[in-house]
Amino acid sequence: MGAVGFQEATWIWRDGEYVAWHECKVHLLATAVQFGTSVFEGIRAYETPEGPAVFRLDAHIDRLIDSAKIYRMVPDYSADDLAKACLDTIRKNEVRNCYIRPMIIRGYGTPGLNPTLSPIETYVAAWGWGTYLGAEALEAGVDVCVSSWQRMAPNTFPARAKAGGHYVNAQLMKMEAVQNGYADAIALGPGGLVSEGSGMNLFIVDGGRVISPVLDGTSLVGITRSAVMQIAMDLGYEVEERPVPRESLYTADELFFAGTAAEVTPVRSVDRIEIGEGKAGPVTLDIQRRFLQTVQGKNDDPHGYLTHV
Ligand SMILES: Cc1ncc(COP(=O)(O)O)c(C=O)c1O
């Protein structure tokens, strides 16, 4: 199967050089391939009136470096180098609205389990990618389920690190959801409370308040999540982080996902139970509008979210 649902670009940045897209290969026995030892980011750039701009580049690079540190990987590049590599890769490929994927991986060194015996390699890919959950999702909202899979306990995998291996859990969630006719899934944490979606954080809106599950070591510390909290406050909403039991999903006035890929996507049902009126709610749409205007450079940028390419 070739490329599905995205536009391949031409070049991938690999340790300071550009490699043709289809020539960018790693060995079968690379530690990252066998054991999931890669850390990565998902970043978006949007077309703005002043040309393409990357949303929260510095925050993503900081998280990448933190992820590497948690997995005892010492990158060969500084934060500035990595940020520059992202911008250069966008320019080199002449992509504008795009998704950017820096990766630091353990390459081919030893087939054994100790990853420190395998070299560190750094890559940046960028490609055109549309709406993650489908063209209609941003407007109409999506139908999701609570997964029968749960997020990992904090002392099993470090959820704060965005590591390739963690996404086997996310893939189990996603496959089950899609095969059962849902767009995506929400996972509970090991304590039974709501954690996050397969590849996005979530918010409920209840009594006019915008609420996100507390960061309890079972979810990624989302960069869109914190921007959405800021945007909601800027719009005058009360914002709260608290433990969220499963049934609060069903009784919420509104529900939405937040993430780099998902952007701000309304959720209209969970487990076939309609949320609110079963469509995108007014608070969600208000936050979504401001979010999209912000990333597309149609607002002031008081929080310094955009880096122009
Ligand atoms: C598991 C998971 N949670 C949450 C998010 C949202 O994080 P961000 O907004 O930083 O993209 C992502 C996406 O990267 C993710 O993969």
Image (spheres, grey):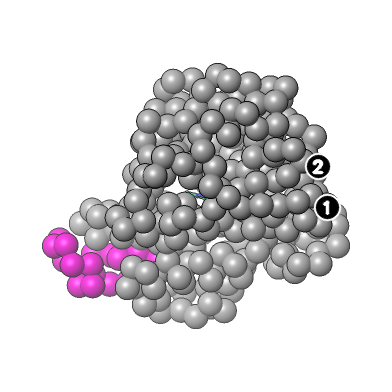
Say which of 84 and 146 sits in front. 146
Q: Quadrant of residue 121?
A: bottom left
Q: Amino acid at mark 2?
A: Asp
From the viewer's perspective, is 13 left or right of 1? right
For disc 2, the marked residue is: 286
Q: Which residues are magenta?
A: 104-123
Q: CA distance from mark 1 to mark 2?
A: 11 Å
Residue at the (73%, 44%) spot, across then down: 209
Say which of 97 and 291 sits in front. 291
Q: Indicate yes or no whether the magenta region holds residue 85.
A: no
Q: Amino acid at mark 1?
A: Gly
Determine whether the residue tagged by mark 2 lies in a helix, strand or loop: helix
Neighbour class for label 1 at 10 Å: few (<14), some, many (≥20)? few
Say which of 177 and 108 sits in front. 177
Residue at the (37%, 60%) spot, across then down: 158
Residue at the (70%, 31%) spot, across then down: 253
For disc 1, the marked residue is: 236
Instruction: Answer above or below: position of 272 versus 134.
Output: above
